[in-house]
Amino acid sequence: MTKNNTSRFSNKDYYFLAIGAALLVTLLWSTSYILNKMAFQHHIGPFTLAGLRYSVSAITLVLVRLILVNRNSIAPKRRVQKGTVRIQLRPYYIVILGVTGYLMAQGLQYSGQMLITPTQTSMILSVGNTVALIVLDVCWLKELRGRSSFLGIVAAMAGAVVFYFPWDFERTHFGGIVLILTSCAGYAIHLALTRHLLKNGKANPDDLVLMPMGIGAIGMLVIGLIFEGLPSFSWPLVGIILWLGIINGSIAFSLWTWSQKHLRAYENSLINNLMLLEVAVLDVIILHRNLSVVEVVGLLIVGLAVVFVQIYSHLKRPT
């Protein structure tokens, strides 16, 4: 009796593990804003950078899988449980996930980052992703329940707006804003579809990372090479690409996809909003940004809203 209890995680344990994994991923992704700006200084185009980053991520995942398969072939074969079925993900799902999650969500986002600052990018993504996901949830997933969840999301969005009030975007930055808002639509579609496939048992988590990432990486590289040309590689640029690809790419996306299996889509989105706080801290530490009183108030509103929704959602879950 005790053995069974200690050898098995409860749903609550997986829930907290998923939150911890998602938080770690947001921290890694927050460093990408700074690293992208450093990479752009080496005269590399946004689609080329994104394509190289996710090409490295896809290659890393392939190598890891080959190592695991080789180890499993050497190790004694385990008895396969009856009823275990390998889920075959339909090809058009792979293409949709690759286009929306990488070509749109990442390629367009990188293009926008060239035109506006990391903190402006983070703020627009925080608000845009949340609004886009709410629209998809109302029309499709229908996971939001209760007025408190909506109030928490609205509060998080309001905090993001307060943080950057008054908005001071020059006309030259308008293109960056449009590109990033368009990337938000791709992100929301990718997140909602991933959640739908996992929730309904139509896909394995691993299949939702490698194949779509490969399609997106190839697409971004083709666009980058055609419209941006080959960059002039240097050791710092190569190091940034490898870090973005291996750590912030393959490892982070695998953890994020796994967390989606145990968290609802809007919970993932709210945790993702913490990047607004994390990017701001990185701006202060690395880029020496000064925060005003209004900006600090905005950060507190976003942070408290995210914590409230997480705690409220957990308490309302059936035991």
Image: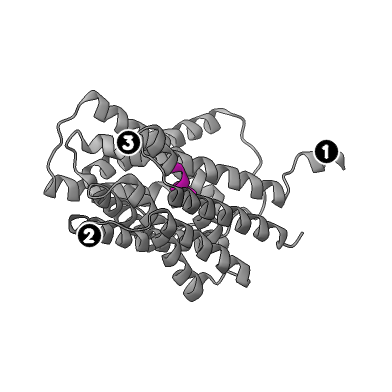
**Total of numbered circles in the picture?**
3
Amino acid under label 1? Answer: Lys
Q: Say which residue appears at 32% left-offset and 58% top-offset.
A: 167
Q: Give the image location of residue 130, x and y in percent.
A: 45, 62
Label 2 to label 1: alpha-carbon separation: 60 Å
User: Mark 1 — residue?
Assistant: 3
SS class, disc 1: helix
Amino acid under label 3? Answer: Leu
Label 2 to label 3: alpha-carbon separation: 23 Å
Which SS type dominates the magenta stretch? helix
SS class, disc 2: helix
Label 1 to label 3: alpha-carbon separation: 47 Å
Q: Earlier in the sequence, mark 2 or mark 3?
A: 3
User: Mark 3 — residue?
Assistant: 35
Please state the extent of the stretch shown in magenta in the rendering: 273-278
Amino acid under label 2? Answer: Phe
User: Mark 2 — residue?
Assistant: 174
